[in-house]
Image: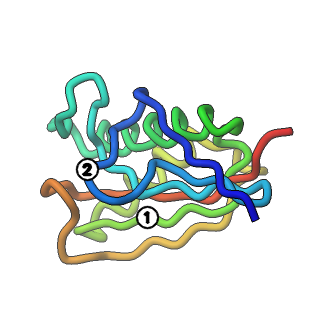
Amino acid sequence: MEKKIIKTDKAPLPIGSYNQAVVVNGLIFTAGQIAIDPSTGKLIESSFKDRVNQVFDNLENILMAAGSDLPHVVKFTVFLTNLENYADVNEVFNGRLDEGLAPARSLVEVSALPAGTDIEIECVAIVNE
């Protein structure tokens, strides 16, 4: 089994002992992404939906660096600090993904997330061949 490490400056750089993504056997496993703007290195502080969209931008840039894209995601895992944001998450997902190709998804509420953010998303995708 060969692992390929993915790194792009179009998404936040890791701040610990992990990589943005790892590719193994045609699957891409991303690290959880939060709403950090990679151009500033800072968490965006505008609306919740803006933060969700920034997370999607970060994931999309990582997937593109790995040779894939959002339509090739097979599973999302979403972490929220407040389930009252569930409807907003769904609205952004519906705007960013083709309903007919929607992947599997888990969404859980957690007590806290890195940098004091309120959303983190990770995914598993297929390499686009």
Instruction: Give amino acid for label 1.
Output: Val
Mark 2 and mark 1: Cα distance apart in space: 20 Å
In the displayed structure image, the side of residue 61 where residue 34 appears, left or right? left
In the displayed structure image, the side of residue 129 where residue 65 appears, left or right? left
- The residue singled out by tag 1 in the image is 78
Give the x, y percent position of residue 124: 63, 59
Quadrant of the image containing the C terminus: top right
Residue at the farthest front position: 2
In this figure, which colouring scheme has been used for the structure? rainbow
Please tell me which residue is depicted at 72% across the width and 58% down the height of the picture: 2
The image quarter containing residue 11 is top left
The image quarter containing residue 113 is bottom left
Q: Residue 49 or 59: which is nearer the viewer?
A: 59
* Number of other residues with Cα within 10 Å of mark 1, as a class: few under 14, some 14 to 19, many 20 or more: many
Quadrant of the image containing the N terminus: bottom right
Residue at the farthest right position: 129
Instruction: Give amino acid for label 2.
Output: Ile
Give the x, y percent position of residue 29: 59, 58
Q: Is residue 115 above or below residue 63?
A: below
The image quarter containing residue 118 is bottom left
Q: Residue 33 or 107: which is nearer the viewer?
A: 33
Q: How many marks?
A: 2
Give the x, y percent position of residue 24: 71, 59
In the displayed structure image, the side of residue 10 where residue 27 appears, left or right? right
Q: Secondary structure at mark 2?
A: loop
Give the x, y percent position of residue 103: 68, 59
Q: Earlier in the sequence, mark 2 or mark 1?
A: 2
- The residue singled out by tag 2 in the image is 15
Please tell me which residue is depicted at 33% across the width and 38% down the height of the picture: 12
